[in-house]
Image (cartoon, rainbow, N blue to C red):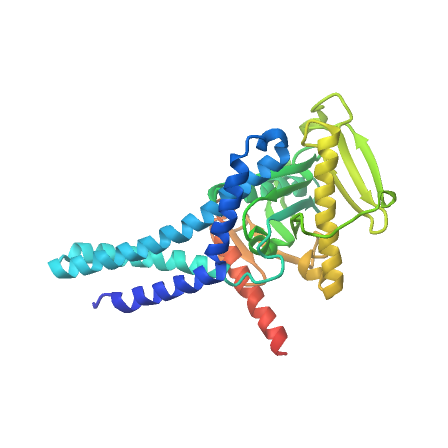
Amino acid sequence: MAGPDFDAQIKQLQATMHTIEQVLDLDAMRAEIADLGEQVAAPDLWDDQDNATRVTGRLSALQGEVDRVSELAQRIEDLEIMVELSRDEGDAASLAEAETELARIQKTVEALEVRTLLSGEYDVREALITIRSGAGGVDAADFAEMLLRMYMRWAEQHSYPVEVFDTSYAEEAGLKSATFAIHAPYAYGTLSVEAGTHRLVRISPFDNQGRRQTSFAAVEVVPLLEQTDDIEIPDEEIRVDVYRSSGPGGQSVNTTDSAVRLTHIPTGTVVSCQNEKSQLQNKASAMIILKAKLLAMKKAEEAAQMKELKGDVQASWGDQMRNYVLNPYQVVKDLRTGYEVGNPSAVFDGDLDGFLEAGIRWRRGAEKAAAAG
């Protein structure tokens, strides 16, 4: 059987990489890295710990992105040299190895190419994610916690920093809700396709009769604000409540009323934060979350796209976007794209890239169809 046309395929990979580098604007990334590097070198950086954490996290994420593209371009160059030497020496074993490497590189480039489809106004932003348990009682709360771990494992695998703002524990097990940020370029554009209702079917570990249980959780994804965003909230529009932080089982995290809940009275939007040590820190973090959600609402209303940006999800029957089935068979299937995986354990352990890529391509196709129609 004839081997691959290395010359044509390597040339195609190089052309694709050139397009990717232009779309991602590596020069702008490198300029921002240089600026952030100067901020990190400043002796007073850690005087403001929150800002220092954001700056160092952003620097790490950007450097990771640039390194990922540069290393991939180098792999293509190395492959070209490997093929040339193998041909000159008539080394069939090395050519077979080159064929394997070619397939691996093509898969990696294809995944990176998906990034170029993220051209929305906020796609480049970091992501703020809220998970809420829905219908299904204690199983739904447990499912919400499984989803939180899934996204955190995904971020960990990509070396993306995660900042947890709030975790509200359910009484028996799991979570009522959780809010966290993933600090990485394009995190919003990538993860926004996760917004919607997720459905779990399994034998309930909380049912002593071992019956099958269906439960739901809602995932909301909004872009994290930047300092240039113009969102001003008059003090009289916000109600501030303080309460005692608590952990699993109702145990007190500390003995002061440091947790903060903010209610935006005109819209009824409620956010809370209890993961910082002081009430002042929690209030500042809660304000970041509130402003991000209000910005998403404002822009969505202006564009009449609330469902697209935030997702009006109820976490119940009829509006689920992905099924996680553990019994009577095992499969995770996205109902919009048709993409499915027969290994739910791997998905819950953060193996989400296939779903994210399929979702981004599906959304781009839907946008093109809408524009054409």
Q: Is residue 241 left or right of residue 150?
A: right
The N terminus - image quarter: bottom left
Counting from the top left corner in percent of width and height, residue 157 is at: 47, 43
Residue farthest to the bottom, as pictured: 373
Q: Is residue 202 left or right of residue 86?
A: right
Tally of marks? 0
Residue drawn at x 71%, y 53% is 316
Residue farthest to the left, as pictured: 89
Residue drawn at x 44%, y 59% is 21
Residue farthest to the top, as pictured: 255
Residue drawn at x 56%, y 58% is 334
Residue 274 visible here: yes
Displayed quadrant of residue 253: top right
Residue drawn at x 48%, y 58% is 25
Displayed quadrant of residue 238: top right
Q: Is residue 184 left or right of residue 90?
A: right
Counting from the top left corner in percent of width and height, residue 101 is at: 29, 55
Nearest to the observer: residue 22 or residue 148: 22
Counting from the top left corner in percent of width and height, residue 136 is at: 69, 45
Residue 322 visible here: no
Q: Is residue 237 left or right of residue 153?
A: right
Nearest to the observer: residue 138 or residue 21: 21
The C terminus - image quarter: bottom right
168 lies above or below 200: above
Counting from the top left corner in percent of width and height, residue 262 is at: 79, 40
